[in-house]
Image: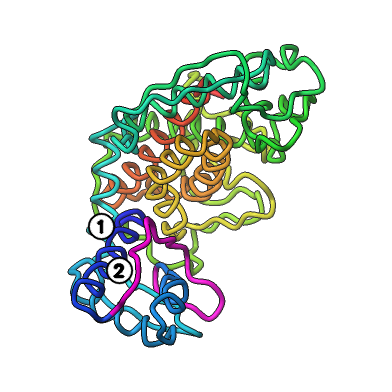
Amino acid sequence: MTPVELSRTVLHAVQRAVDEGELSVTVPERVVVTEPGPGGCGDFATNVALQLARPAKQPPLRVAEILRARLLCDEGIQDVVVTGPGFLNVVLAQQADLAAALVREIHELGPAYGHTDTLAGQVVVLRVPYDVRAEVVADAVVRIVATQGGRGEVEHGEPVNLRPVPAAEDPAPLGADAAQWALLHPAPHDRPRITADHLVQRESNPLFRVRYAHARVRAVSRNAARLGFTAEPGDLHLDTDTDTDTDIDNGSTADIGIAADMDGRGDGGTDLDPLTGVDFGISTGISTGIHTDRTTPTRPLLTTLAAHPRILTAAATHRAPDRLARHLVAVADAVLPFLPAVLPSGEEKPSAAHRARLALAEAAGTVLAGGLSLLGIDAPEHL
């Protein structure tokens, strides 16, 4: 169950409680589902009981218990724990199967993953000033609106309804991709920075992290093909974060055992990772502050991938491509530490778990490529 699906499930629980007379409230249009905060537990949490308590004229804990009873009837939910003043903490059932279903959905839909009919039949008119940033933002919004079934139209004239803060300088010297990112990544009310930082191939550059993550995913796929296996969604067998003897820590090199050509240029795996300064075939995460081992948890990556449809819908309805840009950074930061666990180590033979991990990595690559395309930015096969 994805966060979007869980949000709908909670809404249905509220609707049933209203229909059965236990709650007298207006059913909200949406329910926010997040990772559990301090003191929470489970896979996801929501404060919907606290939001409904006042209009329902009942204590939050009572509202929470009413909703808990209905949520437990859903086969996708294993348990619901009420914590604090009335937070609902949800434990999902059959995580392995659900993770495989998510990855399978992304593989089947490809770049269309996250596309919905939320804005079907709607025409979104964007009236913008004659300004470079406004034009670029409007162009991205048109593409994002199309993913939700709507049609965007760009006009010039008053009253303007899309006026992001203009850039202080001409972004053209940065080049097409960096210029697009410089104008789209900041929130509309923030002035974009037109600096050479967008061209630096370092961890500090979000654009580089996103494009680098996509290139690394493609490199892993090429290496898997050389090792004779392909992606197949299934059980990932990555449930803990305990150390193993195949640990790679703090940017050092160790016994991953794969020194293949990670960028596919045929030079025998001597390509230096620009972020760590070591060979692509044996490099670890993207900085000396990242600890990576072969039992890296998959939840952060699965969570960001599952959130992609919600992010696309929000970016379309709020005319905010910056939301998509920040989401791509989150996906990149989640997939990079995961990649060293995809390929077999040493004498290890490719297994069903390796195929499942490769499928998850490729699903992340699909989301990164699709998101960059919507922003008008190239997703490189090599970097």
User: What's the magenta region?
Assistant: 23-43
Measuring from the top left, give residue 382's x and y in whole percent.
52, 22
Dot 1: what SS? helix
Q: Is residue 195 left or right of residue 137?
A: right
Measuring from the top left, give residue 165's x and y in whole percent.
73, 29
Q: Marks 1/2: CA distance?
A: 9 Å
Dot 2: what SS? strand
- Residue at 25%, 46% in the rendered image: 233
Can you name the residue that lies furthest to the front here? 159
Determine the image quadrant of residue 122. Answer: top left
Measuring from the top left, give residue 330's x and y in whole percent.
54, 46
**Residue type at numbered disc 2:** Leu
- Identify which residue, 230 or 255, lies in the foreground: 230
Residue 36 among those drawn in magenta: yes
Q: Is residue 42 left or right of residue 188?
A: left
Q: What numbered label is drawn on residue 92?
A: 2
- Residue at 67%, 13% in the rendered image: 130
Against 339, is 184 above or below?
A: above
Against 161, is 43 above or below?
A: below
**Residue type at numbered disc 1:** Leu
- Identify which residue, 291 or 38, lies in the foreground: 38
- Residue at 48%, 19% in the rendered image: 266
For label 2, the crowd category at 10 Å Cα-Cα, with few meaning under 14, some 14 to 19 and many 20 or more, is many
Can you say which quadrant of the picture contains the C terminus? top right
Pointer 1: what residue?
Answer: 98
Pointer 1 and pointer 2: residues touching (CB < 8 Å)?
Answer: yes
Can you say which quadrant of the picture contains the N terminus? bottom left
Q: Magenta stretch: dominant SS? A: loop
